[in-house]
Amino acid sequence: MILIEFIIFGIALIIFTIFDFKINAVPSVFLTASLLIALAINPSNLVFGVLALLFGLLLYEFGYFSGMADLKITVMIGFLISNIYVLFAFFLAIMIYGILFKLIYKQKYKEKKECPFILVFLLTYLTIFIPTYII
């Protein structure tokens, strides 16, 4: 992935995170467009997107995250990954950041409020792609 893609999708994730915190939803048209753009830019990464979809469906079924937005973002980031090791780092980072964020969020909001999980994807995205540009 080139730097301009990294910046564009990073900005998109920041906007999605703001939507998630403010209105607890992200318009599906933005998510679907981002997903399709990621696939159009990197069609050779289709396998990684499908693996991310399967991983996302597994997490969705077990209640790890609750919305289709989370699933679409998982697939979008999967389309941006071009290395199996980075894909596994992505999966691991989602699990670690997700558990930590949910613990902190549940501690702060005692009531059963839905957790705005897109922040976890933003942190994961930055964690797996920033080292690519530093090294």
Image (spheres, rainbow, N blue to C red):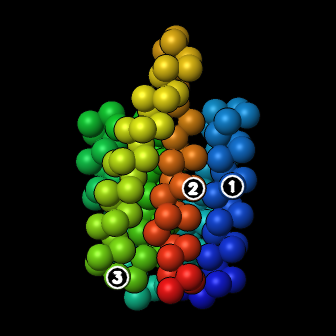
Amino acid residing under circle 2? Leu
Tell me the SS state at disc 3. loop
How far is disc 2 from disc 1 in space, using C-alphas? 7 Å
Figure check: 78 above or below 135: above
Tell me the SS state at disc 2. helix
Q: Position of residue 102 (x, y in %)?
A: 44, 32
Q: Earlier in the sequence, mark 2 or mark 1?
A: 1
Q: Position of residue 41 (x, y in %)?
A: 56, 84
Identify the residue at image location x=70%, y=42%: 19
Residue 8 showing in the rendered view: yes
Q: Residue 122, which numbered label?
A: 2
Q: Position of residue 109 (x, y in %)?
A: 56, 17
Disc 3: which residue? 83
Identify the residue at image location x=39%, y=52%: 94
Disc 1: which residue? 14
Query: Which residue appears farthest toward the front when viewing the image?
Result: 135
Residue 30 showing in the rendered view: no
Q: Residues within 10 Å of mark 3 (few under 14, many from 20)?
A: few
Q: Earlier in the sequence, mark 3 or mark 2?
A: 3
Q: Residues within 10 Å of mark 2 (few under 14, many from 20)?
A: many
Query: In the visual, does 30 lie left or right of 52?
Result: right
